[in-house]
Amino acid sequence: MKFVARAIFLTSIVALAACTDAGRFGDDVYLNGGGAGAPGSADDPASPLYFQQTVGDRVFFAIDQSTLSGEAQLTLEGQAEWLLTNADYTAVIEGHADEQGTREYNLALGARRANAVQEYLVSRGVPASRLKVVSYGKERPIEICSAEACYAKNRRAVTIISADLSS
Amino acid sequence: MMKRFLTLLAALAALSLPIAAQAAPLRIEITEGVIEPLPFAAPDFVAEGGTARQLADDLAQVVADDLAGTGLFRQIPDSAFISQVSSFSSPVQFADWKAINAQALITGAVDLQAGGRLVVKFRLYDVFAGQELGQGLQFAGTRDGWRRMAHKVADAVYSRITGEGGYFDSRVVYVSETGPKNDRKKRLAIMDYDGANVQYLTDSSSIVLAPRFSPTGDRILYTSYESGFPRIYLLDVASVRRRVLEDQQGTMSFAPRFAPDGQTVVYSVTRGGNTDIFRMNVGTGQTRRLTSAPSIETAPSFSPDGSKIVFESDRSGTQQLYIMDANGGEPRRISFGKGRYGTPVWSPRGDFIAFTKQSKGRFHIGVMRTDGSEERLLTASFLDEGPTWSPNGRVIMFTRETQGAGGQASLYSVDITGRNLKRVKTEGGASDPSWSPLQN
């Protein structure tokens, strides 16, 4: 778990450095990140940044599958616990696919993945009303090479924490 | 006489329209065999009245480019000409055109009149028969519409020689792409079939996908993430006004396509991770569910008579093609080859279904009969997908994306014989083409 969370963190930093508009996910969180231990910082367990970096905001899937692996379920246990503790937050679960597939099918596949995460979180007591799902299909890859090393990171569902209760 | 003219042999022999059986002197038979493009001459059109020389030259060149672009015709360069055509009405010196082996001769005249009215006339000659093929025709319009008039001339020439409908006076709506793969900006664009006259229909602030023309070309369906979730929008081409069609909370809707009636739309809705096919009357907003399976049902496309819908489903475990009645009901599977089949599109002629096939890590555009027989793969690459038919059902345009970190999408076209594969000119990246019907 620790290893996975760290690997993702490093990836995010690289992405942040590489593109001018910062990471696509949670760039506000990066920009607002304060010093160590400060509220809202990555060390504050109640912060979305902590959720993203320490709990782990994403799970990965096998090719053309939406089944949650044991590792994915562990990550989602942490997500559920965090969401239950931090009840002011809602979340949007984004489902994604790698580029090996037609556009429409990948949209539907990404929806299956996001839904699998939603169902798991709901099964752990997170109210469905706090969770929304959206699929991006193959439209938003994180990694851009055309090889399994990249595809494996793109076949993902990412839980984006939002404080916007009205949404 | 026929022997002197090119006979193109292709798998279409049996499909030829009855008109093809009528022996015309100048004829391309689209049947199976060796390709030898028919040589034609298109001298600069005569500039009548006060018309600029440049406009007359440009018109003739667009006509020639349309014809040569099909791969069925070959333009003889002006430098080879013995005769010049200085008057539209003077007799043609057939011997001079025979000497350079111009089998077809296209002459034209352009008259730009007061008030910006543009009149274009043309004649088509069968040089070796020493006579005109069909009647001379005249098109009138505005100066701005000069390219359309050239396309109309080329459509008439193509039709007279092949016996099939033309497709040059048509447009393509597509997704214009800029930026790297992990930060791609997409917006809707519309252009002439040959890449000219590009107009952008949306900005790139949200993802837009898979635009589809209405049967009359006046409206476009597409999917946008404007609301944060994929939703179907209907856009009026002339006013560029749009409205959301389907806005149910907790769902995503995508993959829309018009029925031939221009009123019914068929599309996919995802709820709770499950994707099914629905239809909607865009006038009344009334919807009807057409499939209810736990599998992915998407990419629906109507038959040209509106009675059936072809779509893809992974109910068998992998993506395959199915046909059902336009009101739903038990679908019949039509694809049985090895690999995955998606994005089926019914030909406007009703005879074929074009599709995307994935097999052994490659993507193909292919066609099959509506019963699944005679499957033929037309292309192969790292990623080809999303076919759309030319108005005459002879040519397919699709998206090809190159491999790797620098991968870019572009539009390509290919004949349904698998010949004449070529890139369609666009500014920057382009994907998800939809070909309009012929314009009026």
Image (cartoon, coloured by chain):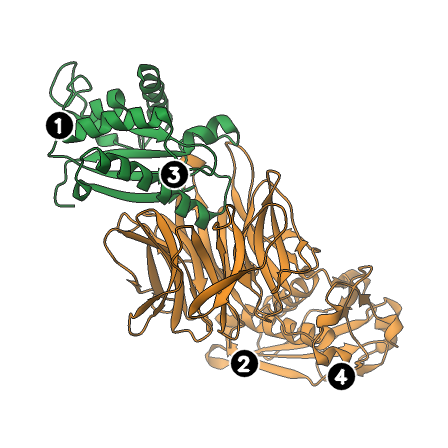
Cα–Cα gap, marks 4 and 1 = 91 Å
Cα–Cα gap, marks 3 and 1 = 27 Å
**Tag 4, which chain?**
B
Q: Secondary structure at mark 2?
A: strand
Q: Amino acid at mark 1?
A: Thr
* Residue A104 shows in this picture: yes
Does residue B229 appear left or right of residue B53 in this picture? left
**Tag 1, which chain?**
A
Q: Amino acid at mark 4?
A: Ser
Which one is in front in this view, the residue at disc 1 or the one at disc 2? 1
Chain B visual colour: orange
| Mark 3 and mark 2 on one chain | no
Cα–Cα gap, marks 4 and 2 = 22 Å
Which one is in front in this view, the residue at disc 3 or the one at disc 4? 3
Q: What residue is shown at x 63% (from left), y 58% (from top)?
A: B367
Q: Secondary structure at mark 1?
A: helix
Q: Which mark is residue B90?
A: 4
Residue that numbered label 3 is attached to: A96
Task: Check the image and report above or below for B383 versus B288.
Answer: above
Q: What residue is shown at x 64% (from left), y 67% (from top)?
A: B57
Q: Nearer the viewer, residue A86 or B4?
A: A86
Residue A109 image point, x, y percent: 41, 44
Residue that numbered label 1 is attached to: A85
Cα–Cα gap, marks 3 and 2 = 52 Å
Please identify the quarter of the rendering in which residue B354 is found.
bottom right
Please identify the quarter of the rendering in which residue B287 is found.
bottom left
* Residue B84 shows in this picture: no
Q: Amino acid at mark 3?
A: His
Which one is in front in this view, the residue at disc 3 or the one at disc 1? 1
Chain A visual colour: green
